[in-house]
Image (cartoon, rainbow, N blue to C red):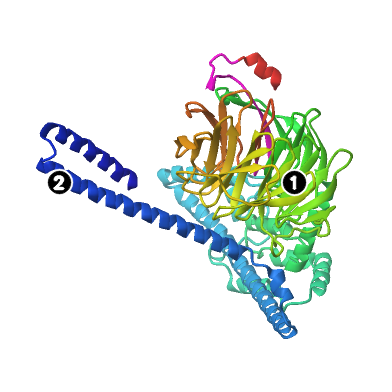
C-alpha cells in the first residue's frame, strides 16, 4: 500500500508541475491536486506508523516466545520445598499410571479392530472368488459377459502375480471352487494335499457365525490384561515367544471351509506376527539409548569422496567436485583453510578434515548440544566451537585437547567445563544466553561472540572478556569482522530485530560499546547472513531478500527483494571472481554478479536447507541438513558472467 500511494503522489506531483508551468499557481486544479497530495501524505504516514507498530509487535512476540522456551526447569526443581516435592511426586506418579493404563486400553482396542479388519478382508476375498465363479457359469451362455469377465480375470491375475502369495488349494486338483478359479486364471499347480469337503456357495458367501464367534473369542484372548511390571512383562513375553507359537498358528489358521487364498493370507500374517511382544515405553527408550551409544561407538571416520559429474548442469558456474560425509546429523557450520576443513553438527561434534588426503583427522566432542558455530585461528592453531552458552577452545597441534571454556556471561574455565555430562543438555544455565555465532578479527587477537541482544568481546592474548557491543532490540543472529587499520576492528551485526548495525572497536576498548551506524532501511525480517567484500556489505534475511550496502557512504546500493523463495541462510564470495553466492532454506544455490547484482545462475545445491557457506583460496564449501558438506569450484566464469567456452576436458579431469 505504501509503495502504491507513493507512486500516486509522485504522479500527482508531476501533474501539478505541468499545470503550474502552463497556467500558473492560481489555477483551480492546482489547489485540488495539493489537497489530494496532502491526503496521500497523511495516508502514507499512517501506513508507516502501522508498519512500525507491526514490527514492534513481532519483536515482542519473538522475545516472549524465547522467554517461554528458556524456562529453567532445574531452578524450579531446586526451589521446591519438601511438601511441594511430595505433592509433585504424587501427582506425576498418578499421572504416569493413568497414562500407562490409557495406552494399554488403546492398544487393546487397536488389536480388536485389527482382528475385525482381517476377518472382513477374508470374508470379502471369499465373496469375490464366489462371484467370479458364478459369473463364469453364466458367461458360458453370454459371449459379451464372457469377454468382460475374461478381461476382469486377467487384471486379477496380474494383481495376484505381483504378490508373493500363490494360490494353494485345500482340496485335490479340479475338485474345489478355488481350483476351478485357478484353472480359469491359468495358475494350476500340482498339489499333494489331503482331500477336503467342498464348501457350498452359501457357506462361502455367508461365513458361519459359530466360526466368527470362535475367531473373535480367540482374538480377544490374545489382548493384554491388566498392566504388569516391566520385568514381569518381559518374562511373560519370553515365555510366550518360546512356547506359544503353535497356539498362535491355530488362532490364525483359517476355518476349514475357506478356500486356499485365505489360508495363504493367514499363514503370511502368522509369519509376520512371530515377533517378541512390544515392550513398555521405558524398555523401548532404554533400548534406543543403548543402540544410539553403540552406533556412536561403531561410527566410522568421515571421508571426503569424489562427487559424480552431472550432465544437466554444465551451465551452472559452480561444479561440485567432492562431498564430505561422516556426520550423523545436520551440519550447521563450516570453516576452512587451504589444507583443513572444520564442520560443526547437530550430532554434538566438530570434525576436522584434511583437504589434501580427504580424511577426517579428529572429532572434537563433549558438547552439551548442537555445535552452531566454528572458527579456526591460523596464527595460534586454536579451534573455537560453540554449543548452547559455551565456547570451547581447542589446541589441535598435538591432540584434540580442550584448553579453556568461555561462557556467554564472560566467565573462563581452564580445561573442558562441559565434559561431565554425556547426554544432550537443552537447558541453558541461569544468567547465560544462547551463543548464535562467533567471529575472529583478521589478526586472531580478538574473538566476538553474539549472545542474546549483545556481542561479547574477548581478548585472546589473555583470554579475558573486555566488554560488550550493545544496541540491538532482538537476539544477534550473525556477525562479520573486518579490520579498518592496525588495532581497529569493524564489526557488522545482524539481528532478529531486522536491523544491521556497525561498531568501531579500537584495541584496548573496555566496557559497553555503542553502534557507530544503523543501516537504513531495515530488512522485513531477521538477518541470517552477512559478508564483506571490499567496501561492500551483503546481507541475507528471513524476508527472502539480499541487500548490498556501501560501507564508506553507509548507503543501500542495490537490493533483490525476493532473491530466493525461502529464508536466505548463507552468503559467500566466490574466490578470485566478482561473484556472490547465496544459499537458502530450500537447498537452492544462486550466483550473483556483484557489480550489477543480476543473477548469473542457480541450481539445487542440496536436497535440504543450506546452513552455511565458507570459502578458501580455491574452493567453496556448503553445509546442509543432509549431513554432508559439498565442495565446489568455480568454472566458466569471466568477469562475473558465464562464459560459453567451457573446457570440457578440464571438467572431466577434475572429476
Q: In this view, does 489 lie above or below 105?
A: above
- Measured from the top left, where is residue 245 in percent x and y? 79, 64
Mark 1–mark 2 Cα distance, whole angstroms, equals 65 Å
Q: Nearer the viewer, mark 1 or mark 2?
A: 1
Tell me the crowding category of disc 1: few under 14, some 14 to 19, or many 20 or more residues within 10 angstroms, Cα based.
Answer: some
Q: Is residue 500 left or right of residue 210?
A: left
* Magenta stretch contains residue 206: no
* Magenta stretch contains residue 632: yes
Of residues 406 and 219, the one drawn nearer to the viewer in this rendering: 406
Of residues 136 and 47, the one drawn nearer to the viewer in this rendering: 47
Quadrant of the image occupied by residue 407: bottom right
Of residues 406 and 572, the one drawn nearer to the viewer in this rendering: 406
Q: Mark 2 points at which residue?
A: 32
- Which residues make up the magenta segment? 624-646
Quadrant of the image occupied by residue 357: top right
Residue at 73% across, 83% down? 86
Determine whether the residue tagged by mark 1 lies in a helix, strand or loop. strand
Residue at 54% across, 39% down? 539
Q: In this view, does 144 lie to the left or right of 515?
A: left
Q: Residue 459 carries which label?
A: 1
Q: Residue furthest right?
A: 398
User: Along the polypeptide, which appears first: circle 1 or circle 2?
Assistant: 2
- Measured from the top left, where is residue 90 in percent x and y? 71, 83
Residue at 46% across, 39% down? 562
Amino acid at each position: 500500500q505504501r509503495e502504491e500511494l507513493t507512486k500516486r503522489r509522485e504522479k500527482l506531483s508531476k501533474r501539478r508541475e505541468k499545470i503550474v508551468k502552463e497556467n500558473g499557481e492560481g489555477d483551480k486544479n492546482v489547489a485540488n491536486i495539493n489537497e489530494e497530495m496532502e491526503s496521500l501524505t497523511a495516508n502514507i504516514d499512517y501506513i508507516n506508523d502501522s508498519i512500525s507498530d507491526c514490527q514492534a509487535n513481532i519483536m515482542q512476540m519473538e522475545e516472549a516466545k524465547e522467554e517461554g522456551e528458556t524456562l529453567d526447569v532445574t531452578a524450579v526443581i531446586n526451589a521446591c520445598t519438601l511438601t511441594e516435592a511430595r505433592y509433585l511426586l504424587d501427582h506425576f506418579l498418578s499421572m504416569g499410571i493413568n497414562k500407562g493404563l490409557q495406552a494399554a486400553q488403546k492398544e487393546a482396542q487397536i488389536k480388536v479392530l485389527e482382528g475385525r479388519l482381517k476377518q472382513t478382508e477374508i470374508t470379502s476375498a471369499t465373496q469375490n472368488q464366489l462371484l467370479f465363479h458364478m459369473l463364469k457359469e453364466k458367461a458360458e451362455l453370454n459371449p459379451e459377459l464372457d469377454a468382460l469377465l475374461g478381461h476382469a480375470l486377467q487384471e486379477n491375475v496380474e494383481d495376484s502375480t505381483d504378490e508373493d502369495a500363490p494360490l494353494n488349494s485345500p482340496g485335490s486338483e479340479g475338485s474345489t471352487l478355488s481350483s476351478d478359479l485357478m484353472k480359469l486364471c491359468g495358475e494350476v499347480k500340482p498339489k499333494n494335499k489331503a482331500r477336503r469337503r467342498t464348501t457350498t456357495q452359501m457357506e462361502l458367501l455367508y461365513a458361519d457365525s459359530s466360526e466368527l464367534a470362535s475367531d473373535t473369542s480367540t482374538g480377544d484372548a490374545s489382548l493384554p490384561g491388566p498392566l504388569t511390571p516391566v520385568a514381569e512383562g518381559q518374562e511373560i513375553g519370553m515365555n510366550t515367544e518360546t512356547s506359544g507359537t503353535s497356539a498362535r498358528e491355530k488362532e490364525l489358521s483359517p476355518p476349514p471351509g475357506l478356500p486356499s487364498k485365505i489360508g495363504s493370507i493367514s499363514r503370511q500374517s502368522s509369519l509376520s506376527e512371530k515377533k517378541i511382544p512390544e515392550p513398555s515405553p521405558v524398555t523401548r527408550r532404554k533400548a534406543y539409548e543403548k543402540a544410539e551409544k553403540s552406533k556412536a561407538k561403531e561410527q566410522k571416520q568421515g571421508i571426503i569422496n569424489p562427487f559424480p559429474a552431472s550432465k544437466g548442469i554444465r551451465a551452472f558456474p559452480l561444479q561440485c567436485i567432492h562431498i564430505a560425509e561422516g556426520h550423523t546429523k545436520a551440519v550447521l557450520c563450516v570453516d576452512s583453510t587451504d589444507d583443513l576443513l572444520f564442520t560443526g553438527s547437530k550430532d554434538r561434534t566438530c570434525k576436522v578434515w584434511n583437504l589434501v588426503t580427504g580424511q577426517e583427522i579428529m572429532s572434537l566432542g563433549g558438547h552439551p548440544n548442537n555445535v552452531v558455530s566454528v572458527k579456526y585461528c591460523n596464527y595460534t592453531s586454536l579451534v573455537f566451537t560453540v554449543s548452547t552458552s559455551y565456547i570451547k577452545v581447542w589446541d589441535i597441534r598435538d591432540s584434540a585437547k580442550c584448553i579453556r571454556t568461555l561462557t556467554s556471561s564472560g566467565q573462563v574455565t581452564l580445561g573442558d567445563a562441559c565434559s561431565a555430562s554425556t547426554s544432550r543438555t537443552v537447558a541453558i544455565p541461569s544468567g547465560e544466553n544462547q551463543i548464535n555465532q562467533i567471529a575472529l578479527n583478521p589478526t586472531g587477537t580478538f574473538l566476538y561472540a553474539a549472545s542474546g541482544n549483545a556481542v561479547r568481546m574477548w581478548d585472546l592474548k589473555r583470554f579475558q572478556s573486555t566488554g560488550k557491543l550493545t544496541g540491538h532490540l532482538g537476539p544477534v543472529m550473525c556477525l562479520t569482522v573486518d579490520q579498518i587499520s592496525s588495532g581497529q576492528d569493524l564489526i557488522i551485526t545482524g539481528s532478529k530485530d531486522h536491523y544491521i548495525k556497525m561498531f568501531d572497536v579500537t584495541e584496548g576498548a573496555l566496557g559497553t560499546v555503542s553502534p557507530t551506524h544503523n543501516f537504513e532501511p531495515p530488512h522485513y525480517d531477521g538477518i541470517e547472513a552477512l559478508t564483506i567484500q571490499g567496501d561492500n556489505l551483503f546481507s541475507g534475511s528471513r524476508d527472502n531478500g539480499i541487500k548490498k550496502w556501501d560501507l564508506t557512504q553507509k548507503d543501500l546500493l542495490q537490493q533483490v527483494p525476493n532473491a530466493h523463495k525461502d529464508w536466505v541462510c548463507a552468503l559467500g564470495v566466490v574466490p578470485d571472481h566478482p561473484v556472490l553466492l547465496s544459499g537458502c532454506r530450500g537447498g537452492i544455490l544462486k550466483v550473483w554478479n556483484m557489480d550489477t547484482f543480476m543473477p548469473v545462475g542457480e541450481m539445487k545445491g542440496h536436497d535440504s536447507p543450506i546452513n552455511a557457506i565458507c570459502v578458501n583460496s580455491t574452493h567453496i564449501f556448503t553445509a546442509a541438513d543432509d549431513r554432508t558438506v559439498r565442495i565446489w569450484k568455480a568454472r566458466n566464469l569471466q568477469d562475473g558472467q558465464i562464459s560459453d567456452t567451457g573446457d570440457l576436458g578440464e571438467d572431466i579431469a577434475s572429476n
